[in-house]
């Protein structure tokens, strides 16, 4: 209990350093999960401790044995509560991952580089590969472009750097377009409001809801350094497209 009090009742810097969030945010999260129902205080373990174990694990990529030592709990207890919190966090998805507004983003509105050409754009999508641990019998399915097993994760991000959709769990060998098709067909998948669209990279096909750049044309911002100005309409479009889409790449840590 002394360790827990120091963790989320002590100094702000300790809470941010260990749990990756401020104390007020941590307690709001715990209250939210408790009121929703999936998480409850047990005889020996409060919701706050359950969430703290979960956040320490994912925030620092800790193993079960490390969390067991720091929180003085058995490995079985740590694993059980981790899965319960993970399930509860998943229930927050529909409420937390959504568009706050469908108005023209402030990054675009009034900017002569983007407005009115991208006025109906609400963000960008990107596929990223996240390291994962899977059973040896299926590890080959999770080997793709990386030398280690990964999940192919599809994310949609708005221009305020907020996630509006995430699809995780696909094998690293799965193509980005396959993950996107699944997300669009799933009952609780990605929904693009009528008349709006996301920016996408050249790995996706052009369609009403997704706008990729022109292929076989300069695109990445590093290719425009110096005096390499656009020479054609397609190059100008790709330059503006790339400038906007870097939002999602920056948010995913590329």
Image (tube, grey):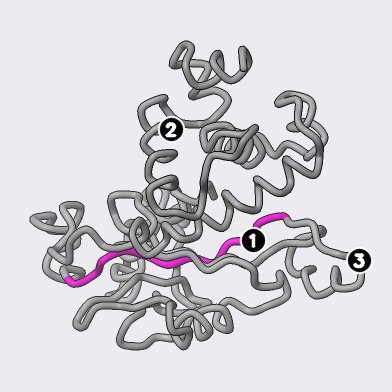
Q: Nearer the viewer, residue 191 or 52?
A: 52
Depth check, mark 1 against mark 3: the one in front is 3
Q: Are marks 3 and 2 in contact (CB under 8 Å)?
A: no
Q: What is the x, y in percent for residue 130? A: 65, 57
The part of the chain drawn in magenta is: 120-131
On screen, 80 above or below 201? Answer: above
Depth check, mark 3 against mark 2: the one in front is 2
Q: Nearer the viewer, residue 232 or 149?
A: 149
- Quick one: quadrant of the N terminus? top right
| Residue found 67% across the figure and 78% down from its top | 174
User: Label 3, on which residue?
Assistant: 136
Quadrant of residue 23 within the rendered picture: top left
Task: Confirm whether residue 38 shows in the render.
Answer: yes
Of pointers 2 and 1, the one earlier in the residue sequence: 2
| Residue found 57% across the figure and 76% down from its top | 176
Residue sitting at the far front: 43
On screen, residue 53 versus residue 148, left or right, reads left
Q: Residues within 10 Å of mark 1 (few under 14, many from 20)?
A: many
User: Label 1, on which residue?
Assistant: 129
User: Label 2, on which residue?
Assistant: 26
Q: Nearer the viewer, residue 72 or 144?
A: 72
Of pointers 3 and 2, the one earlier in the residue sequence: 2
Depth check, mark 2 against mark 1: the one in front is 2
């Amino acid at each position: 209990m002394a360790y827990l009090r120091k963790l989320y009742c002590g100094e702000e810097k300790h809470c941010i350093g260990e749990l990756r969030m401020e104390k007020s945010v941590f307690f709001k999260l715990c209250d939210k999960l408790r009121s929703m129902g999936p998480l409850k205080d047990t005889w020996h373990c409060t919701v706050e401790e359950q969430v703290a174990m979960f956040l320490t694990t994912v925030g620092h990529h800790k193993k079960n044995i490390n969390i067991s030592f720091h929180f003085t709990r058995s490995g079985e207890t740590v694993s059980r509560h981790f899965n319960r919190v993970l399930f509860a966090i998943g229930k927050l998805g529909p409420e937390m991952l959504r568009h706050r507004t469908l108005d023209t983003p402030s990054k675009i509105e009034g900017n002569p580089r983007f407005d009115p050409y991208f006025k109906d754009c609400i963000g960008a999508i990107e596929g990223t590969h996240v390291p994962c641990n899977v059973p040896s019998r299926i590890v080959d399915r999770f080997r793709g472009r990386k030398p280690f097993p990964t999940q192919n994760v599809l994310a949609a991000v708005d221009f305020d750097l907020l996630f509006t959709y995430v699809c995780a769990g696909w094998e690293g060998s799965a193509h980005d377009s396959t993950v996107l098709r699944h997300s669009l067909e799933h009952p609780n998948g990605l929904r693009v409001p009528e008349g709006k669209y996301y920016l996408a990279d050249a790995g996706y096909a052009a369609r009403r809801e997704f706008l990729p750049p022109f292929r076989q044309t300069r695109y990445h911002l590093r290719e425009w350094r110096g005096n390499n100005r656009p020479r054609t309409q397609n190059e100008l479009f790709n330059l503006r497209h790339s400038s906007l889409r870097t939002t999602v790449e920056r948010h995913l840590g590329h």
